[in-house]
Amino acid sequence: MDDDITTFSVQRVRYDEENGICLVSGADDEEEPAGYFIIQIEKGDPDGPLIEIFGEDLTQADGVVALEIGLRSLHFTFDPKSLIGAEMPMVRIESQTEIPERARTRLAVAFGKRAKRA
C-alpha cells in the first residue's frame, strides 16, 4: 500500500489571503508563488477546490477523497478515477516548517468532512 504514496518534501506551505490560494512550494520566494502543489479555494464553488500539481498538466476540480492535516504534513487521498488520482492515488506533503494555522483551517473548511486533523 505504501507504494501508492507519492511524497514531496517542501520548504513551506502558506495561505495567500488575497487570492484564496493555499500554496505548497519548494521555492522560498514570496514574490513568485511558484509551487508544485496549489489549491485554489473559492467560496461557493460547486466543483470544490481547484487542485494543481506540477503546473497545469495535472489540474482538477477537487477529486479528494480524504485529507489528513498535520502540523508539518498534508496527506491527500484522491479518487482513482480523477486525473490526479489516476497518476498519484495518495500524495503526502512534508513541510520543513510548521504549516500556518490559517492554511490548516482553510483546508479543513474547504474539504469539510473529508478533512481531519492528525
Image: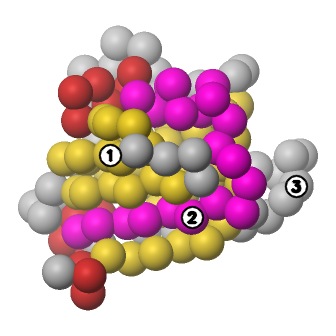
Judge whether residue 46 can be spotted in this image. yes
Of the image marks 1 and 3, the number of the one nearer the N terminus:
3
Judging by the rendered image, the residue that carries numbered circle 3 is 29
Residue 39: horizontal and vertical position, in percent?
A: 49, 43
Stretch in magenta: 89-108
Q: In front of the other: label 1 or label 3?
A: 1
With respect to residue 12, does 4 lie above or below?
A: below
With respect to residue 109, does 31 lie above or below?
A: below
The CA distance from mark 2 to mark 3 is: 18 Å
Residue at x 28%, y 25% (from the top left corner): 112
28 in the magenta segment: no
Of the image marks 2 and 1, the number of the one nearer the N terminus:
1
Residue 95: horizontal and vertical position, in percent?
A: 64, 60
Between residues 59 and 64, which one lies in front from this camera angle? Answer: 64
Judging by the rendered image, the residue that carries numbered circle 1 is 67
Quadrant containing the C terminus is top left
The CA distance from mark 1 to mark 3 is: 26 Å
Q: Residue furthest bottom?
A: 3
Label disc, if present, on residue 94 of the rendered structure = 2
Q: Residues within 10 Å of mark 3 (few under 14, many from 20)?
A: few
Q: Secondary structure at mark 2?
A: strand
Q: Residues within 10 Å of mark 1 (few under 14, many from 20)?
A: many
Q: In front of the other: label 2 or label 3?
A: 2
